[in-house]
Image (cartoon, helix red, strand yellow):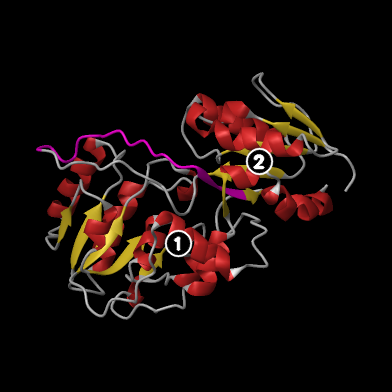
Amino acid sequence: MRAIDIGIFPLTAKTARLDALQAFAVALRQTEHKVTWVEEPGYRGCDLAIIYGSPGVGVGKRRAARQAIISRHRGPLLIVETPLFGRKVPLIKHRRLPFLRAGSSETFDRFRVALNGCFWDNGIFCNEPTDARRWDRLRHELGLECRDYREEGDHILLVGQVPGDASLRGLDVVKWLESTVIDLSAWSDRRIVIRPHPLSGHAALSNLARSLRSRGMTNWEIRSGGILSEALRNAWATITYSSGAAIDSLLMGVPALSMCPASMAWSVSDHELGKIEQPTLFDRRPWLDRLAHSQWATAEIADGTVWERFRAKIADMI
């Protein structure tokens, strides 16, 4: 691989996420390539750009920084994102007013890494070949368990997402929750538990509840607070648009339906509400092996392990 010009753009990341970009700088400065840590706003021309996160929609200085880079860069783009396993979300306690907007900070030391996208349908993860020992090690390190599929369940869990999240691709997630509750009534009599994201606004959720009641829909509830595993307990199936909650669901043995190919559970989930009473029980192990090779510890980025995975593909793309 010839020497290339690599730009790393720290203004795309929160301070708490800079570790991953700094780790790439450490690794790449041990190679023959030119590496520039771009402190100034805007885009600096380079062969390979490394950023944190996808642009999504809405406003914000980090989103604006990503959009400025993505719109101008013409070479491969290496994107660092939140991990698929090992996210530690603080417990959101039940409140007297459960629809109140709540802050939600996450901590992790592992990161998803992909080229030109970071979702199932647009990211190049360079996660082949796989080594089964990696999932086994990751499972041990993070205390994960892939349970047998459940044999019964009493409710359908309908999961919301952060409004404006990049994986929604412009979808109004609250309107999607509403239409899904309505459409599900044609396919199942099970109670629907709606789990909104903690960052969903109070007004939007109040409007959702009011609209469903006005349509005569009664077989549902909005359940805020608690941890995801509690909501999954005794669930028959989980429905997401593109949320990573589908991964948690499948690990707990609860079949998942995902409605957008951006979902990292797309290959092991159904995509039609008509499957809700007989969801497919996919073999999850090959998928877990691929996911395990799609996220990396900060130390693995810094020691060059991740670069070795992507180096040949990047050379082909330049």
Disc 2 crowd, CA 10 A, few/some/many (<14, 14-19, 20+): many
Question: What residue is disc 1 on?
Answer: 139
Magenta residues span 96-113
Which residue is found at the position 15% from the left and 55% from the top?
221
Q: Position of residue 250 (x, y in %)?
A: 38, 67
Q: Is residue 136 toward the left or the right of residue 70 in the image? A: left
Residue nearest the observer in this picture, 27 or 227: 27
For residue 196: magenta? no
Q: Position of residue 148 (x, y in %)?
A: 34, 76
Regarding mark 2 in the picture, which secondary structure is present there? helix
The alpha-carbon separation of the residues under discs 1 and 2 comes to 22 Å
**Amino acid under disc 1:** Arg
Q: Position of residue 51 (x, y in %)?
A: 63, 36
Which residue is found at the position 21% from the left and 48% from the top?
226
Residue nearest the observer in this picture, 1 or 299: 299
Residue 243 seen in render: no
Q: Give the number of the disc on residue 181.
A: none
Q: Is residue 203 toward the left or the right of residue 279 in the image? A: left
Which image quadrant for residue 146? bottom left
**Amino acid under disc 2:** Ala
Question: What residue is disc 2 on?
Answer: 302
For residue 106: magenta? yes
Q: Main secondary structure of the magenta part?
A: loop
Which image quadrant for residue 27? top right
Which residue is found at the position 31% from the left and 38% from the top?
199
**Residue at the farthest right position:** 2
Regarding mark 1 in the picture, which secondary structure is present there? helix
Q: Position of residue 187 (x, y in %)?
A: 26, 74
Residue nearest the observer in this picture, 27 or 176: 27
